[in-house]
Image: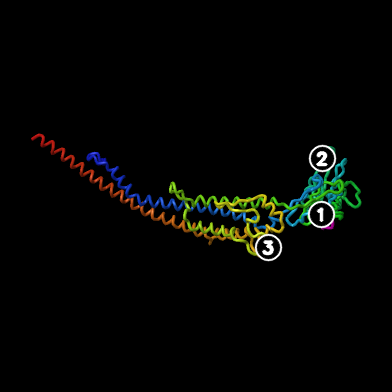
Amino acid sequence: MAISAAGVGSGLDVGSIVSQLMAVERQPLTRLQDQQKSYQSKLSAFGQLQSAMSKLQDAAATLAKSSTFSATTANAGDTKAFTVTSTASAQTGSYNLEVTQLARAQRTATSATVAPDLAGGGSLTITLGSGTPKTVNLEDGATLQDLRDAINAADAGVSAQIVNNGTVNQLVISSKETGAANAFKLEGTGGLSAFSFDPAAPAGDMVSVQQARDAKLSIDGLAITRSSNTVSDAIDGVTLTLVKPTDGETAVTVARDDDTAKKAIDDFAKAYNDLNSLIRSQTSYDAATKKAGTLNGDASVRSIQGQLRSVFTNPMAGLSGATMLSQVGISFKTDGSMSVDSKKLAEALADPSKKIGELFAGNGTVDGVAKTLETRIKDMLGTDGLLSARTEGINRTIKSFDSRIDTLEVRLEKVQARYSAQFTALDATMSSLNTTSAYLTQQLSRL
């Protein structure tokens, strides 16, 4: 079998010639690949734009809630005796509170000196308040642990545990809830008769560790009784958590919480500025370097900018307070970024006539700035929205490039094979001619 080495006999660099010819042939493929990369860059840029718009939508959704502008904060005069929280429904003001008694759960235990005897087995009926009695039954030979487990499995509104006091094991039974209405009665039979206990007339081997009782307090002189130490229905929108009795009356104050609204507006401004910065970067053009941003000249981006700006530039008709962001300390710089004047904003929040909550959230009839913006972005990000249509179009274009590139690569493989065959044949022919020439020259030299 002959061994072929292109160019050995002829001096023709077949590999280099074919490579140079293919470099020319591949130029259309390179252009297609470059165009595809540009569309992939656009798709990535639109992904970043979509993410920034989504963050702005979330920030607008917070401002679109009226509760953002009606938040309150509550303070306790004696934080060691109670804590207090408030919601947007709480009325601002001050209250005089006195706690005289905490709510407690009933707790009953066996003797602290004599171990309980369960010999013979029996039954124990547990009645919690006015509820339905629950009965547990134990057979002869059952242990104190068996009784504890049976009580805990009975779903009777009480829990049981065993405590070793250093002398004997005591069975401690407790109500799961505080309050006088959650007191329980025990009625034992047989070997469990010693576990009987009536909180109304304590007697026998079981002892009262703690009586069930309600919390007692007064608010502005009005006596209040609750079964729990968490009182959330005495003052509208205010929850009191009682820790211990107070030393006389102490104050509970509820005030407007402007910090919640300020933070929401600052977050909104940041989200908008991040989006504005991204758009400026993606649509920029540097005249010196003649380099354009990925989305420079894109009609969809211009439409997005126009729709967003129209929300801020047009007054919100139908509102009785402020109708423009500039009236509450929010303005725009020459680069399109949003600026918040903290002092002017604080004054607007403190001025009821500005109705700043309505400016952002609306009044039930007219949507405010934030609500309008949230809806507009939602439409643009939706499945039938502007951004979805644009990205779907780009994806289709990228896929069409895939098909064209595959077809061209197949054609180029055939072209390269043809060039290789042609120049290999040329090389062989030239090699043969060189050999013949050398032979003739040798023969002529002998004449």
* Image x and y of residue 19, in percent: 31, 45
* Mark count: 3
* Image x and y of residue 425, in percent: 23, 46
Q: Residue 371 vs residue 183: left or right?
A: left
In this view, the residue in front, 227 or 3, is 227
In this view, the residue in front, 305 or 437, is 305
Q: Residues within 10 Å of mark 3 (few under 14, many from 20)?
A: few
Identify residue type, mark 1.
Thr
**Marks 3/2: CA–CA distance:** 71 Å
Magenta residues? Answer: 127-136
Q: Element at badge 2?
A: strand
Q: From where the camera sits, is residue 183 visible?
A: no
Q: Residues within 10 Å of mark 2 (few under 14, many from 20)?
A: few
Is the image coloured rainbow, by chain, by secondary structure, or in one colour? rainbow
Q: Element at badge 3?
A: loop
Q: Residue at x 76, y 56 (%)?
A: 90
* Image x and y of residue 130, in percent: 84, 58
- Image: 43 above or below 3: below
Q: Which mark identifies residue 164?
A: 2
User: Which one is closest to the eye, mark 3 or mark 2?
Assistant: 3
For marks 3 and 2, the one nearer the N-term is: 2
Q: Which mark identifies residue 135?
A: 1
**Marks 2/1: CA–CA distance:** 26 Å
Residue to which mark 3 is pinned: 320
